[in-house]
Image: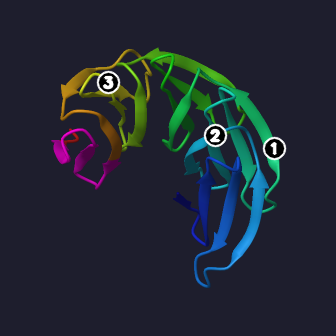
């Protein structure tokens, strides 16, 4: 789920669609067909980005017109997606990588190795945080340089979701029914 300031965007993995909902009224505005088995969705200020797990792609949708304007190849099994102000970051769960995409051009800038079965992605203003589902860890990547993770931090079993609250990174560990709180700095 993502919010664009007016609408809620929901990735529907079974129907291969994205639903656009008016946040004020709850009315469905549109349903847009994209790739296969959607998981992640993010907003970059102009476009909605959706991961297409079965297709190994990410779809770029114009949030104003609801048109799919680009489909970009990434790694196998794209899951989570985040925006850092300039780039889109996609966690590729099967290839154990994160793809960095120039949001303006759609060009793939880099592909970075992370832990096993990455799922969630978050941006803290400086770093990209990626949950490694089968490694019980999160990878911390410098967003500006995009080099190999600057740190790998152990968390609970099967870390899935990740979020930034302005000070800390929060990781939901689905295998232990716990949440890990990490200072972002």
What residue did someone put label 1 on?
69
- Residue at 73% in and 39% down: 35
Q: Are marks 1 and 3 in contact (CB under 8 Å)?
A: no
Q: In the rendered view, would you say 131 is above or below 33?
A: above
Residue range of the region highlighted in magenta in the rendering: 163-182
The alpha-carbon separation of the residues under discs 1 and 2 comes to: 19 Å
Q: Is residue 17 magenta?
A: no
Of 177 and 152, the residue lying toward us: 177
Q: In the rendered view, would you say 61 is above or below 57?
A: below
The alpha-carbon separation of the residues under discs 1 and 3 comes to: 34 Å
Which element carries disc 2, helix, strand or loop?
Answer: loop
Quadrant (top left/top right/bottom left/bottom right) for the C terminus: top left
Q: Nearer the viewer, mark 1 or mark 3?
A: 3
Q: In the rendered view, would you say 165 is above or below 148?
A: below
List the single residue furthest toward the bottom.
25
In the picture, the disc for residue 10 is none
What residue did someone put label 3 on?
134
Magenta residues, dominant SS class: strand
Which element carries disc 1, helix, strand or loop?
Answer: strand
Q: How far from the left and from the top, in percent, is residue 95?
A: 51, 16
In the picture, the disc for residue 37 is 2
Please indicate whether residue 44 sits to the left or right of residue 104 in the image.
Answer: left
Please indicate whether residue 88 sits to the left or right of residue 178 in the image.
Answer: right
Of 79 and 62, the residue lying toward us: 79
Q: How far from the left and from the top, in percent, is residue 69?
A: 81, 44
């Amino acid at each position: 789920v993502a919010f664009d300031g007016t609408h809620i965007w929901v990735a529907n993995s079974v129907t291969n669609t994205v639903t656009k909902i008016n946040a004020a009224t709850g009315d469905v505005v549109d349903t847009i067909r994209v790739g296969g088995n959607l998981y992640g969705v993010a907003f970059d200020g102009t476009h909605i980005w959706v991961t297409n797990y079965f297709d190994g792609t990410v779809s770029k949708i114009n949030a104003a017109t609801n048109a799919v304007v680009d489909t970009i190849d990434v790694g196998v099994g794209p899951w989570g997606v985040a925006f850092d102000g300039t780039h889109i970051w996609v966690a590729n769960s099967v290839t154990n990588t994160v793809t960095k995409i120039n949001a303006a051009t759609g060009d793939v800038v880099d592909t970075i190795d992370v832990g096993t079965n990455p799922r969630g992605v978050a941006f803290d203003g400086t770093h990209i945080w990626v949950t490694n589902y089968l490694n019980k860890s999160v990878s911390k990547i410098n967003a500006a340089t995009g080099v190999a993770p600057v740190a790998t931090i152990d968390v609970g079993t099967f870390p899935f979701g990740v979020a930034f609250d302005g000070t800390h990174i929060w990781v939901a560990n689905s295998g232990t029914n716990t949440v890990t709180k990490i200072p972002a700095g």
